[in-house]
Amino acid sequence: MDTLVQIKNLSKTYESIDGKVNAIKDVTFDIYKNEFLTIIGSSGCGKSTILNILDQLDKEYQGTIEFTEDINIGYMLQEDALFEWLTVEENALLGLKILKKLNDETRKYTISLLDKYGLKDFKDKYPKSLSGGMRQRVALIRTLATKPKILLMDEPFSALDYQTRLQVSDDVYRIIKQEGMTVVMVSHDLAESISVSDRIIVLSKRPATIKNIYKIELSNKSTPIENRKAKEFAYYYDILWKDLDKNV
Ligand SMILES: Nc1ncnc2c1ncn2[C@@H]1O[C@H](COP(=O)(O)OP(=O)(O)OP(=O)(O)O)[C@@H](O)[C@H]1O
Ligand SMILES: [Mg+2]
């Protein structure tokens, strides 16, 4: 297993007018190339803090993060963050524009992603005419357009209803595998985490420390929806549930 990122003894304390908040403490883990790694933990324990640090949005922390190669990171925030006054195509191109990487070639690639993933007829429409699942796909394409080696996703499906959520996580999974990406996702949903992940990190309550790291080994591993039928599914659900339960 090739290591892409080594995270060692990561700690973070927020200082605000209300005092100090110890968010994460001594968090150490590796991110392997091409894996789907999910981080779960109770509400407010420090999950987003870890992603913000990985994305280098937040530079004030203790510990070290070592990248084994020079990589470009894509970050998909919890809300789809589409701009209602921009068309689907303009929204999809925004990430490139911000990074000053928008040119004929990258524009063509982005449009090919929109075409490939079912948004061909919606390029000139505004986000309000899209379903929740389609909006999520546009947000993902905006991030994918910058060709990130690592994709960070914070609760990417939480705004969607159950049925849509199953479909979208299947779609997103397929896109991620086709584009050969490494993923670090934060989720609250145990079943979803088991269905998509190669490994799951369970955090303790705040300040977050690593409680356990599980390797998810399902027989006949395939798409997320199919993976829910694997015979090992209930076993993982049970141990993760117990791990989280002890947190509260
Ligand atoms: N800018 C900030 N200033 C002060 N405290 C903060 C700040 N950002 C987060 N915190 C606190 O740090 C802790 C961890 O926050 P974080 O957002 O990482 O948790 P989380 O696990 O992502 O929560 P959720 O499950 O609700 O998304 C929380 O107690 C939060 O209130
Ligand atoms: Mg969060």
Image: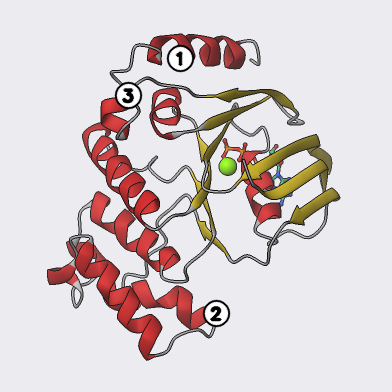
Is residue 16 visible in the rendered image? The answer is no
Badge 3: how crowded within 10 Å, few (<14), some, or many (20+)?
few
- Tell me the residue that label 3 is attached to: 220
- Tell me the residue that label 2 is attached to: 99
Badge 2: how crowded within 10 Å, few (<14), some, or many (20+)?
few
Whether 110 is drawn above or below 156: the answer is below
CA–CA distance between discs 1 and 3?
17 Å
- Tell me the residue that label 1 is attached to: 237
Looking at the image, residue 242 sits to the left or right of residue 4; the answer is: left
Q: Amino acid at mark 2?
A: Leu
Looking at the image, residue 231 sits to the left or right of residue 32; the answer is: left
Q: Secondary structure at mark 2?
A: loop
Whether 210 is drawn above or below 86: the answer is above
From this viewpoint, which residue is outermost toward the bottom? 104
Q: Residue at x 64, y 44 (%)?
A: 31
Q: Amino acid at mark 1?
A: Tyr
Q: What percent of the width, then of the height, locates residue 112? A: 26, 73
Q: Amino acid at mark 3?
A: Asn
Q: What percent of the width, then of the height, locates residue 45? A: 67, 32
Is residue 69 visible in the rendered image? The answer is yes
From this viewpoint, which residue is outermost toward the front? 1
Are discs 2 and 3 less than 8 Å apart at CB? no
Q: What percent of the width, then of the height, locates residue 44? A: 63, 34
Whether 159 is drawn above or below 120: the answer is above
Q: Secondary structure at mark 1?
A: helix
